[in-house]
Image: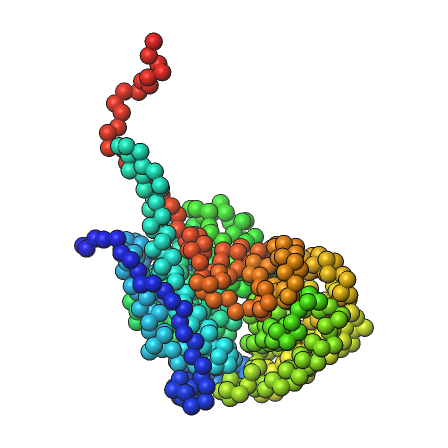
Amino acid sequence: MLKGFFSVPTPLNEPVYSYAPGSKERALLQEALRSARSQEADIPMFIGGQEIRTGNKGELRPPHDHKHLLGYYHKGDKNHVTDAIEAALAAKKDWEDLPWEHRAAIFLKTADLIAGKYRYKLNAATMLGQSKNAYQAEIDSACEIVDFLRFNVKYMSEIYAQQPPISPDGVWNRVEQRPLEGFVFALTPFNFTAIAGNLPSCVAMMGNVVVWKPADTQIYAAHLLMEIFHEAGVPAGVINLIYAHGPDVGEVVFNHPDFAGIHFTGSTAVFQEIWKTIGNNIHKYKSYPRIVGETGGKDFILLHPSADVKAANTAIVRGAFEYQGQKCSAASRVYVPKSLWPALRELMTKDIDSFKVGPTEDFSNFVNAVIDEKSFDKLARYIDQAKADEDAEVIIGGDYDKSVGYFIKPTVILAKKADYVTMREELFGPVLTVFVYDDEKWEETLKLIDETSIYALTGSVIAQDRYAIAQAADALKNAAGNFYINDKCTGAVVGQQPFGGARGSGTNDKAGSMINLLRWVSPRTIKETFNPPTDYRYPFLEE
């Protein structure tokens, strides 16, 4: 077997295609959309490298066109969860024994397949299954997943290269990074194909085996990711993809002695229940499981009286309404000084009124559908409540219609009280709440932002006054794991802004960085002595 200290290719962020009219990529994506819509997919689970079809099918429909059938997926049960765990454990030894450079090569090939051969097919699947427009799909299911894969390979090589700085004469100290003992459970959300791909793949990259359950509303793209993993050379059983009912999966996974960790993105409530379950079962496990989760957000944009109003407006309307506000980083509460509010309100109203809302296949639509009827109904209730409440006023939007797709018109609520419900609770949709504060109450507002929400994911301050920026950065240091200055509070890029929050927003293990990958290894320190002592006596014992 060849030996060597290998340098991996230097990662660069994948270029974002424009999809402008007349461009080659626009034509290729439109063809991929037509092709996907013209056929009904039959989507199996993948367990131990085998396609598993149960005949118990669930439907997959575009959120923006729920009368159209994209295809079916085959639902699993507890037995399939057990099968997936057994397949993972059976694959474990060969996978962790494979030299790391071969694992690296598999995922570098995965990145190249997504960036090239599968770019438009995966983007089309994301657009149809998750109702993302062409640009939102491009930055997600093309660029971000490619960046995750390429940068994670680089981080992996750097982790392996970290060694003790001192080995005294006659001693060699070294550290090896072992995969975890057991299997890891990846539970992924609907809103980012990149997250769905990264959560199982970065764990596997470090030599672990994985049982992966995506959100039902993301299965359409998840199954294509799995096919790409297989084509790139991920061996059978290393990543196992299942579509079983959440509580059934949890009952099997969290009671298994070989459960070694969970990689999670989703709601805070679900993550907290998972943590409690793991705690209650801690005596059952061979090792203490790694618990890594990125959860909710109630992300803020704060304007100082010195803010550039035009820049603030663009940050707000993009941060709040791109992908219908269904990003855990999306702006959902804005604090505006009274002196700037009239000008900002005028700009916001003009821009939001210019938004086109409709299906993703029409590239002129800035806003598309929310993910499903449950989300639609929840958002409609909050909007109706705001219309009825004395403490709130719907000043922009407020309309919704689910007859064709789950469309919520971008809505802005003016809160008359800083603790109004939509200033505190995560809505996960195109609903933004604004609170107007007195200019002289800047410091009071900083305290208000820090204390209003249980979350601490993203936040932004917009100001020209550098003293105000410094003051906000300090006062809000615990209020956001990703903090932005004069920009929207969303759009983190792998290799540039490692992503994650604390408080109710998760464990802050920073996806897209070495920090996250370190959670999926268990170091072993090795000390080798070349000339060991042969007498127990130390010199101080001599008389």
Residue depicted at 50% across the width and 77% down the height: 136
Q: Position of residue 468 (x, y in %)?
A: 66, 60
Q: Residue furthest right?
A: 390
Q: Is residue 53 left or right of residue 373?
A: left
Examine the rendering and report whether any part of residue 75 can be seen. Answer: no
Q: Is residue 363 left or right of residue 397?
A: left
Residue name at image x 42 percent, y 72 percent:
143
Q: Which quadrant, please, contains the C terminus?
A: top left
- Count up the numbered dots: 0
Write down the quadrant of residue 535 in the picture. Answer: top left
Q: Farthest residue to the top: give it.
A: 543
Which residue is at 51% across, 66% downward? 492
Residue 530 picture quarter: top left
Q: Residue at x 46, y 74 (%)?
A: 139
Q: Is residue 457 above or below residue 527?
A: below
Q: Position of residue 217 (x, y in %)?
A: 50, 74
* Residue 275 x, y percent position in the rendering: 54, 54
Q: Nearer the viewer, residue 1 or 476?
A: 476
Residue 331: x and y in percent read 62, 69
Is 331 placed left or right of 162 in the picture?
A: right
Q: Nearer the viewer, residue 126 or 303?
A: 303
How does the figure colour the protein chain or chains?
Answer: rainbow
Q: Is residue 295 above or below residue 51?
A: above
Which quadrant of the view contains residue 422?
bottom right
Instruction: For the N terminus, give its image quadrant.
Output: bottom left
Res. 110 in view: yes
Q: Nearer the viewer, residue 151 or 65?
A: 151
